[in-house]
Amino acid sequence: VKAAADAAKDEQAFTEDGVQVEVAGNIAKVADAEKLVAKGGEAVGLLRSEFLYESSQVFPSEADQEQAIRQVLTTLGERPLIVRTLDVGGDKPLPYLPLPEEENPFLGERGIRVGLDKPAVLRQQLRALLKAAEAGRLRIMFPMIASLFELNLAKQILNEEAQKLGIDMSNIEVGIMIEVPSAAVMADLLAEHVDFFSIGTNDLTQYTLAIDRGHPKLAGIADGLHPAVLRLIQMTADAAHRAGKWVGVCGGLAGEKDAVPLLVGLGIDELSCSVPVIPEVKHQVRGLSKTQCVELAGKAMMCADAKQVRELMKAFHADHD
Ligand code: PEP
Ligand code: MG
């Protein structure tokens, strides 16, 4: 499998019945872009921009941020790059960006909520991104969007900065993470206001099942293959497609062998996984039939729990591999 996967790593991935699934990668620093290209990544589906801030003792300057993004874009060439705006709070603290002490940080100020509360930080990051955009194919993504109100505010800020800089937004796609259940449920409304969705299954699972993703005892049962999570993914994908938009998955499920057939069956257009597994995910997609995956996903959504879905997938692999 490994040899076959490596041999075809630079080819696009189509299912047996001819449906293309774009296979992208998640990166967290400038140097990762080269590794992604070497592994045959077709795009960066998620650049976690936190790295720019975590590696610094003070706020990185606008020029430093621009420079880092330019470097990634240059390495990627024609390949698109999704940069997610700063996603701090919850499990991701920043020493020089004090957030309030909270009893439930995962349910508090994190993601876009921080950006909207401290708009100067968000504006500076957006300016850096906009200025770097000419170096390649940039897409901008907002994290932790829970309502249309937040999306509209974030977009307004983005458009204001673009206008001030005189930058034409028509070539810059704007999307959101779908990682809060309210966003998945309201995806039909949100879809009208974005170019794409990317589903963050790590947080979507945590918030759907009400289990802390890092919980020492419970994290193991916070399984993204829970039928409730799969149904939310289906709602999101259907809403995106009805609005003519594309939808990716950038959470951990995108690189999981048990999940890939289900995500293909749910209509996901792009899988953004960790860089080392890109060739294997492509290889797996090539061995799937979309028609079969749709049927399989239908069965999985009727299961009672994640354990049953895992059993379904075990039987599928036994039949299929
Ligand atoms: C997610 O929540 O699935 C996701 C991709 O974002 P992060 O893991 O960075 O929170
Ligand atoms: Mg997340």
Image (cartoon, helix red, strand yellow):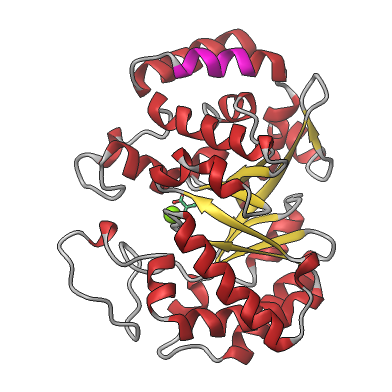
Where, by quadrant of the figure, is residue 32 drawn? bottom right
User: Magenta stretch?
Assistant: 294-301
User: In the rendering, at what x and y percent does residue 26 appear?
Assistant: 59, 55
The answer to whether residue 35 of the structure is visible from this angle is: yes
* Residue at the image position 67 percent from the left and 76 percent from the top: 69
Q: For this view, does 286 lie left or right of residue 69?
A: right
Where, by quadrant of the figure, is residue 62 drawn? bottom right
Where, by quadrant of the figure, is residue 307 drawn? top left
Q: For this view, does 112 lie left or right of residue 31?
A: left
In the image, residue 201 lies in the stretch drawn in magenta: no
Q: In this view of the protein, which residue sits in the foreground, 315 or 126?
A: 126
User: In the rendering, at what x and y percent does residue 249 appear?
Assistant: 57, 43
* Residue at the image position 31 percent from the left and 62 percent from the top: 91
Q: In this view of the protein, which residue sits in the foreground, 296 or 208?
A: 208
Position of residue 77 relative to residue 44, above or below, is below
Q: In this view of the protein, which residue sits in the foreground, 225 or 39?
A: 225
Position of residue 20 relative to residue 114, above or below, is above
* Residue at the image position 78 percent from the left and 42 percent from the top: 9
User: For the stretch drawn in magenta, what is the main secondary structure?
Assistant: helix
The answer to whether residue 317 of the structure is visible from this angle is: no
Q: How many numbered circles does the render carry? A: 0
Position of residue 29 relative to residue 193, above or below, is below
* Residue at the image position 43 percent from the left and 73 percent from the top: 116
User: In the rendering, at what x and y percent does residue 201 appear?
Assistant: 46, 43
Q: Quadrant of the C terminus?
A: top right
Q: Quadrant of the N terminus?
A: top right
User: In the rendering, at what x and y percent does residue 208 appear?
Assistant: 34, 38
Q: For this view, does 247 lie left or right of residue 53?
A: right
Outermost residue, left side? 103
